[in-house]
Image: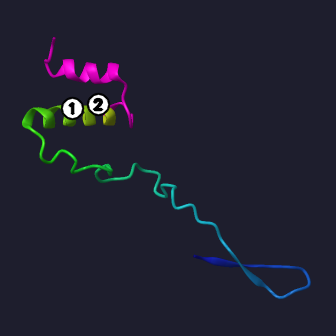
Amino acid sequence: MTVEPTQFSDSQPTEAPVFVDRRKNVGGTAPGGRERRQFADSHEGLSPEARELAMAIDSYKATHHRRFITYEEMLQVIRSLGYHK
């Protein structure tokens, strides 16, 4: 943490903490690297078909900036894979 001196009219300089917002992107450019996912390895042990569905849903969520999807959206993803009743 960085501190800077603070001046008061009739006292000695004291040090006050400086707030640093680490959430801001200092460079002004998009952060590089891969997006962090909470459950990155959750597709292990799935059948090939289930893994394909899980990856398609993850792709849909990333594309549409959604953490959770509705049943209608899930049905849309399933149909996009070629499944039908």
Percent x, y for residue 26? 49, 58
Percent x, y for residue 7? 81, 79
| Residue most extreme to the top | 85
Closer to the camera, 56 or 27?
Answer: 56
Q: Which residue is mark 2?
A: 60
Percent x, y for residue 74? 29, 24
The amino acid at mark 2 is: Tyr
Percent x, y for residue 37? 31, 49
The N terminus lies in quadrant: bottom right
| Residue most extreme to the right | 10
Q: Which residue is mark 1?
A: 56
Image point 20% across, 17% down: which residue?
79
Occupied quadrant, residue 17: bottom right
Image point 76% across, 84% down: which residue?
14
Give the residues drawn in magenta, as a range. Answer: 63-85
Occupied quadrant, residue 21: bottom right
Badge 2 local density, few (<14 within 10 Å), some, or many (20+)? some
Dots 1, 2 in contact, CB < 8 A = yes
| Residue most extreme to the bottom | 12
Vertical comparison of 4 with 64: above or below:
below
- Please check the rendered image and state whether residue 33 is part of the magenta-colored stretch, yes or no: no
Secondary structure of the residue carrying tag 1 is helix
Vertical comparison of 19 with 70: above or below:
below
